[in-house]
Image (cartoon, rainbow, N blue to C red):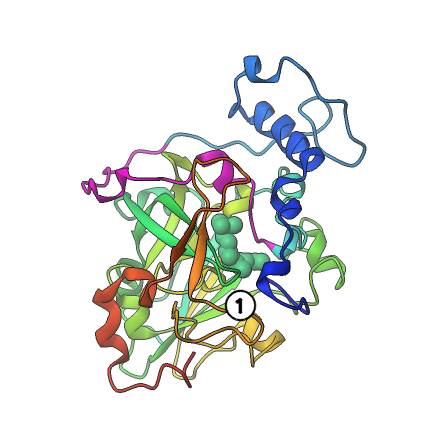
Amino acid sequence: MLINVPKASAVKESEITDEKVYNQRRDILKSMGFIGASALLTSQPAQAGFFTSDDKKTFKTRALEYTPAVTSQQSQAFTPEEKIITHNNFYEFGTAKSDPVENAQQFKVNPWRLSVEGLAETPFTLNYDDLFSQFPLEERIYRMRCVEAWSMVVPWIGFSLAALIKKAKPLSSAKYVSFETLYDPKQMPGQKNRFAGGGIEYPYVEGLRLDEAMHPLTLLSVGLYGKTLPAQNGAPIRLVVPWKYGFKSIKSITRIRLTDKRPPTTWNILAASEYGFYANVNPEVSHPRWSQASERRISSAGLFSRNRIDTKMFNGYDEVASLYQGMDLRKNF
Ligand code: MTE
């Protein structure tokens, strides 16, 4: 996300490609087992202030059991795992794209407690193990479009948010669903320091209309690329709403609440004229400071590649169009 920068083109390539930061990330990835040692024969000097395999623990992921996606549609171009887990927005761990992978490696996700509450007949809570065992896990390959005009194709693993909501038996008065990220300033440096956290009022909060939440595309993700989520991608459980800009996909959720009022959402609180409640991907509605008509797809082409494609309405997920029939999507951006 961007605050107070002139336009999207001002997002420096160096934000994602700065060689020093990239090499530091490679140290972390190597210690996580993502990069073979042979690729690192020229070892990088240790950098003060960053975690390395020698002096700091790294976040552990493990293989998951799940039903693989049947679609061949996306065999085209998954974004490589290394890019999905090193180019992140997770302001609780810092505002630069490289901050989460560098600062989240000691994040503790077990024990975890996710409460499902509010206007429901049978509210309940899930512990860490429940997140992986209460609902059958399946793979969903989704195109993800960030409001900063880059996109990725991610093989998520998770279950439909609808399944979780049904289990709580919503009352007829429930019209919206609100979400809240863990609040733990001891673990999340961005929550301790307003500047480091991008001026956000924590905990990070998000919301959906109940019908959006119940749509079969809406996913609660617990993994990607066959394994549990890395901390920087929102472990142990995060939302994924593929027809909306990425900021709706709230990470590391501890509370899901059924409500009768439209819930406040973090980026809307911070800059209402720039980030709406709906946040549907819409090439015809520019962000006040840059166009949304096209996007840079982060793919296996080199880090410096200019892989620009046209952005589609609802990020190409036309099946959600009926949710917004009769609404002016210029006003309801
Ligand atoms: N959730 C929390 N709690 N904190 C954040 O800063 N950033 C959002 C979203 N969820 C964010 C968050 C934004 S702006 C984006 S684009 C996506 O997470 C990025 O997800 P990714 O890092 O897995 O690509």
Where in the figure is residue 323, as x and y percent of width and height?
25, 76
Residue 124 horizontal side relative to residue 2, left or right: left
Residue situated in front as seen by the camera: 256 or 85? 85
Instruction: Name the residue that disc number 1 marks.
Output: 205
Q: Is 224 situated left or right of 323 in this image?
A: right
The front one of 217 and 202 is 217
Image position of 248 with respect to 175: above or below: above
Q: Residue furthest right?
A: 48
Question: In the picture shown, does residue 39 fall above or below 227?
Answer: above
- Dominant secondary structure, magenta: loop
Residue 146 position, x and y percent, is 47, 58
Q: Dot 1: few (<14), some (14–19), or many (≥20) neighbours within 10 Å?
A: many
Q: In this rendering, does residue 100 appear at all?
A: no
Residue 206 picture location, percent across and down: 48, 68
Which of 189 and 182 lies nearest the eye of the viewer? 189
Q: Is residue 62 left or right of residue 194?
A: left
For image coordinates 29% across by 47% down, the residue present is 140
Q: Residue 167: percent from the left, percent from the top?
A: 27, 61
Please identify the quarter of the rendering in which residue 283 is found: bottom left
Query: Which element carries disc 1, helix, strand or loop?
Result: strand
Q: Quadrant of the C terminus?
A: bottom left
**Residue displayed at 41% across by 68% down:** 117
Name which residue lies at 46% across and 76% down. 277
Query: Is label 1 within 8 A of ligand 1 (CB to nearest ligand atom)?
Result: no
Question: What is the three-letter code of the residue carrying label 1?
Answer: Val
Q: Quadrant of the N terminus?
A: bottom right
Q: Is residue 321 magenta?
A: no
- Residue span colored magenta: 64-90
From the viewer's perspective, is residue 41 above or below residue 226?
A: above
Task: Choose top left, top right, bottom left or bottom right for residue 66.
Answer: top left
